[in-house]
Image: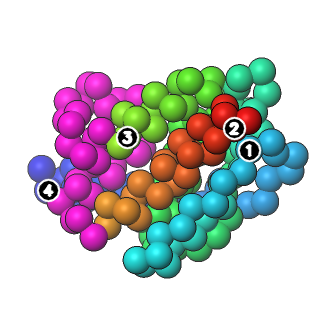
């Protein structure tokens, strides 16, 4: 189990350092700001949705390693997916963090984001891990209501 924890830590560190999805996105037709007042994490998520597909996505802002890595992982996972599939993945991630789904096979769709599974053991960090995911869900819900 210790090896898995180290692997997960390495994945989180790698995403925090590389942040390939952290940049301005233009054009975009979906934008939402996510803010966690308790720790100061603040991100703006942008996506270009075309024909119900997430063509591209990126984020800007600042925050702790966990919030930045989580945003980076989420964007890796949702690019090229339908909006409905992106929402399913958001819900799957949130269920994993809430420990409602713990079966590794069911969580495989989360790819690298499965590395955040044990964040649920650190309640103070949960908000950091879910910030980008909640922000994406809010953006999609708001867009669908327009």
Please report whichever mark, 2 or 1, sits nearer to the chain's N-terminal start: 1
Please report whichever mark, 3 or 2, sits nearer to the chain's N-terminal start: 3
Q: In the image, what residue occupies the spot 62% across and 28% down?
A: 83
Read off the residue under disc 2: 143
- Image location (x, y in percent) of residue 78: 58, 35
State the CA–CA distance, disc 3 to disc 4.
22 Å
Q: In the image, what residue occupies the spot 41% across and 29% down?
A: 109
- Image location (x, y in percent) of residue 57: 69, 45
State the CA–CA distance, disc 2 to disc 4.
42 Å
Please report whichever mark, 3 or 1, sits nearer to the chain's N-terminal start: 1
State the CA–CA distance, disc 4 to disc 1.
40 Å
Q: Which picture quadrant has residue 96?
A: top left
Task: Assign a secondary structure to mark 3.
Answer: helix
Q: Which residues are magenta?
A: 95-124
Read off the residue under disc 3: 93
> Is 110 drawn above or below residue 43 in the view shown?
above
Task: Assign a secondary structure to mark 4.
Answer: helix
- Would residue 138 be visible to someone looking at this image? yes
Read off the residue under disc 1: 30
């Amino acid at each position: 189990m210790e090896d898995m924890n180290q692997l997960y830590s390495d994945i989180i560190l790698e995403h925090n350092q590389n942040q390939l999805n952290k940049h301005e996105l233009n054009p975009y037709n979906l934008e939402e700001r996510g803010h966690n007042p308790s720790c100061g994490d603040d991100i703006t998520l942008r996506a270009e949705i075309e024909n119900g597909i997430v063509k591209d996505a990126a984020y800007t802002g600042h925050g702790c390693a966990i919030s930045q890595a989580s945003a980076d992982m989420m964007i890796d996972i949702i690019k090229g997916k339908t909006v409905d599939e992106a929402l399913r993945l958001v819900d799957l991630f949130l269920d994993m963090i809430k420990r409602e789904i713990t079966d590794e096979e069911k969580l495989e769709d989360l790819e690298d984001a499965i590395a955040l599974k044990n964040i649920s053991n650190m309640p103070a960090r949960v908000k950091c891990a879910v910030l980008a995911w909640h922000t994406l869900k809010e953006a999609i819900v708001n867009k669908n209501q327009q």
